Image (cartoon, coloured by chain):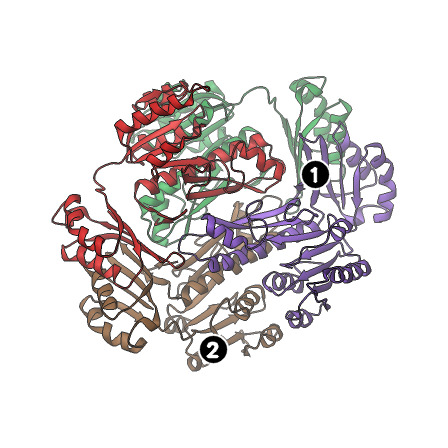
Chain colours: A red, B purple, C green, D brown
Amino acid sequence: MLTLSCPDRVGVIAEVAGLLAGHGGWILEASHHSDAESGRFFMRQEVKADSLPFDADGLRQAFEPVAARFEMDWQVTDTGVPKKMVVLVSKQEHCLYDLLARWHSAELEVDLAAVISNHDVLRGVVEWHGAPYHQLPVDPDNKAQHFDEIGALLGKIQPDCVVLARYMQVLPEWLCREYAGRIINIHHSFLPSFAGARPYHQAYERGVKLIGATCHYVTADLDAGPIIEQDVVRIDHSDSPEDYVRYGKDVERTVLARGVRLHLEDRVLRNGNRTVVFD
Amino acid sequence: MLTLSCPDRVGVIAEVAGLLAGHGGWILEASHHSDAESGRFFMRQEVKADSLPFDADGLRQAFEPVAARFEMDWQVTDTGVPKKMVVLVSKQEHCLYDLLARWHSAELEVDLAAVISNHDVLRGVVEWHGAPYHQLPVDPDNKAQHFDEIGALLGKIQPDCVVLARYMQVLPEWLCREYAGRIINIHHSFLPSFAGARPYHQAYERGVKLIGATCHYVTADLDAGPIIEQDVVRIDHSDSPEDYVRYGKDVERTVLARGVRLHLEDRVLRNGNRTVVFD
Amino acid sequence: MLTLSCPDRVGVIAEVAGLLAGHGGWILEASHHSDAESGRFFMRQEVKADSLPFDADGLRQAFEPVAARFEMDWQVTDTGVPKKMVVLVSKQEHCLYDLLARWHSAELEVDLAAVISNHDVLRGVVEWHGAPYHQLPVDPDNKAQHFDEIGALLGKIQPDCVVLARYMQVLPEWLCREYAGRIINIHHSFLPSFAGARPYHQAYERGVKLIGATCHYVTADLDAGPIIEQDVVRIDHSDSPEDYVRYGKDVERTVLARGVRLHLEDRVLRNGNRTVVFD
Amino acid sequence: MLTLSCPDRVGVIAEVAGLLAGHGGWILEASHHSDAESGRFFMRQEVKADSLPFDADGLRQAFEPVAARFEMDWQVTDTGVPKKMVVLVSKQEHCLYDLLARWHSAELEVDLAAVISNHDVLRGVVEWHGAPYHQLPVDPDNKAQHFDEIGALLGKIQPDCVVLARYMQVLPEWLCREYAGRIINIHHSFLPSFAGARPYHQAYERGVKLIGATCHYVTADLDAGPIIEQDVVRIDHSDSPEDYVRYGKDVERTVLARGVRLHLEDRVLRNGNRTVVFD
């Protein structure tokens, strides 16, 4: 899998496709996007692994000169190696449950390296599924320690993806930066509406007719990172804030699962604070 | 048609339904809502006109004592008398066109009393359809006069519904107040996101994955009145702000038409800054 | 909770509401529907239990004469008593998992009396959640025995709701009849399109642009019973039948859960082969 | 604009992109699809016209050898030349109105060469918009003459797109064949459900919870041609078949307009009875 972005100019596709074809590379899926505003070009090429005469490292070496010439931000990943995922939760179970179910049924082919929580209530279901559970309590007077412990654990695991599955703590800036582009959050509103706390209650107060959920990359700016996926569901005047919460859970689950999958399949490329999603 | 709201208590439905049944009233459609938060009760009763031994005025008289006893906000309208509608536009034609088409095909059974615009470009299509067109230009240095003229015209017409069909001027507070609950706007975003100017460009900058439109009652608070109807459409990274505008038009048209119909059929009851919509 | 249907005529609402009000009944939610085609009237009244001077049986007794006079099909249920649910599955886990999660988190307040399967693979997750699991194998040459065993088990449990959560066997007519209006199936297509086997592959062959799922009551007529709920999801040319299956699972889960909830809350009334859904 | 399909093999993208880049071609939008089932490869390349040293004919000549080598079905169109469109209608106006509005506002940049109808009722609105209107009456006992006249008119115009905008006649096989891949119909159901007559009434009888519309290419097989676009809208038990018709019109309009645009921009490639839609 090859993904890249670079300043747009004549010949980028020809050059990349030519290099792959020259080595017999069978392209399974090719996606491109020229961003008129930023003048950048984005590409994702999924190549049948055994059609090339070398492995991921070989491809990296072969590609290096082209990448340099076109000033590319690029990466090659081996789709044969499952990505490493860590899930952070608090007490709410619906998003975690959903991810566990998709992992358990092999719908989500990922190495679930750890579930981390500041509580112990979800240990049972996680361990029953065979994933490691780490309880790292938060001391409200010294949150720094909690995040140091998380940082240490992540440092050991080196995850490709850290999912905040309704984890209720705000990550410190240093963590956001260290894992920039790898931390995915699900926010229970259709952002940018109702950022912050109790979004369903905010939505109820405002009287909107649809509520939603947003899956986005986490940045130091709360609820303001690049959006990967969103969806909404219709509610009406007969629904209470509690009903919103219930309907919303279904949207949260689905939107988070889609976002995680898109990220794991290298289908999300950042374009400033926006995303290019080759789905 | 009877619509009402009152403090919730035992026996409201029994009392109203009993009164109607006592006079032989055949209920075509009955809708109720108890709002737990505000403690108010909302009701809409559509009665077959010729099943009652009196007309709308007679029903008003018969109902008066009940209404007083239960401290009701209420109104009786005669569904046989078409409502009066005025449409305000600027230069953009898509919402006006859509309303004209629905009116022309009798989908929207309303008395289209006037189309008012600060420009002349839409006169042709309006007059071809047989509706009166009034051009009332805006002097940027003296907008007050424009609104006085609108006020005078509305005063003569006494409309049940004033539709801002992409009318680009902000109405003065006195007009909003005078026609409170009767002025309907279409805003080209999924409010409360992207209130104010150029919402599609704001949406593009933020990188949302769905864009929308909101039909709401106009209050003195810009883009913050009670919402009647909303909807969204999916966009992706390949769409430019111009594409957003194009997709958005389809949503605007549909959402506005739905909102106008709901209002004309007395299906929208205000509950503070929220609405109860009996659709 | 009172639900009923009867021939439509003047005074039904007044009579029922009057009776409830006469005993001090506080109506939490009242829904009505007059079906113009069949001439039948449908009603659902949710009454605050402790506002009445009697229990469900008392209400039944008090209501009997009214019901007789208006030739009503009616039932009174005590919302304080959880309904009994049985789930039938085969090997596919996504719908079962979802129901277990909702039950486990108390989103679905029901007495999960049994999970029955012809296989053993899902025993672990069911028993971990604390629900009884019954494996009743199917002998392809003698399916009758399997269904006799199911019938015997259901006879003991007397469930209010039997959910076919991707249970792959066709129920015999006698079972469909015995539990008419209580057996709910999830079919993985937007019925009536693609009834029968392998609907996602049928959808792929036909080249539709949306796929869906349908939750319906089971009748002796395969995939043709009254529909409770449906939904769809957009697919495109880049999706394979396997992708359809994956997207479809999300729709199946959500549609089934909505349908089961609507049924358990007595919100679904049958109108011939159609349903009135008071949601 | 270059669109093509061919048997999938290594090097197609490289070859095409290489040829374009060799002549300085600036690719505005590039889309590809490998169909695993049929083993065919599909491509659409939108090239900035003035970046090439030749016109559409020059590109055709330059491309010929590559096309032959890879056994391509291909076409080059000049996006600077508006396509020719003919619209066939009967008496229903909503789809025609919508297309006229989009054409009039230049949202749809097309040469509207003719509107043909078997009735005269829509002449006014068409001629007001400045498009030629042809009434060609149908003699129920001799429909052949009607279609001969249509055939003659189309023969003179040579349209790129013939839109059946709720035209109620079934086209003869010879016309379908002569304009294969150029005739677009809007059917007022979510096909394959409810093909044929009165689909909204069929939908009502079946009790579905969503109704829809389908835009598809016309083939000799009624309502069974390749689907371009579909969408649905939610209805409930309170809606009559007449309400279905009204809601449905909104979906028909939008789905037809999307389908026509996709076709006019050469975004729809046929893959057997399925379509590849590069939107």
At 33% across and 41% down in the image, what residue appears? A263
Which image quarter is the N terminus of chain D in? Answer: bottom left
C172 or C103: nearer the viewer: C103
At 85% across and 46% down in the image, what residue appears? B53
Q: Chain of mark 2?
A: D
**Amino acid found under the numbered disc labelled 2:** Ile
Residue C93, image x, y percentages: 35, 31
C146 or C208: nearer the viewer: C208
Residue B200, image x, y percentages: 52, 54
- Work out whether disc 2 and disc 1 sit on a shared chain: no
Residue B188, image x, y percentages: 57, 53
Q: Chain of mark 1?
A: B
Tell me if mark 2 has few (under 14), some (14-19) or many (20+) residues whose alpha carbon lies within 10 angstroms of its own: some
Choose top left, top right, bottom left or bottom right for residue B92: bottom right
Visible residue check, residue A168: yes
Tell me if mark 1 has few (under 14), some (14-19) or many (20+) residues whose alpha carbon lies within 10 angstroms of its own: few
Is C76 displayed left or right of D258 in the figure? Answer: right
Is A91 displayed left or right of D78 in the figure? Answer: right
Q: What label sits on residue C239 in the rendered view?
A: none
Question: Are discs 2 and 1 less than 8 Å apart at CB?
Answer: no
A233 or C16: nearer the viewer: A233
Q: What label sits on residue D150 in the rendered view?
A: 2
Q: Which residue is mark 1?
A: B272
At 37% across and 52% down in the image, what residue appears? C236
Is B168 displayed left or right of A142 in the figure? Answer: right
Q: Is residue C192 above or below residue C30?
A: below
Give me the C-alpha separation between circle 2 and circle 1. Answer: 59 Å
**Amino acid found under the numbered disc labelled 1:** Gly
Residue B236, image x, y percentages: 42, 52
Q: Is residue A231 above or below residue C158?
A: below
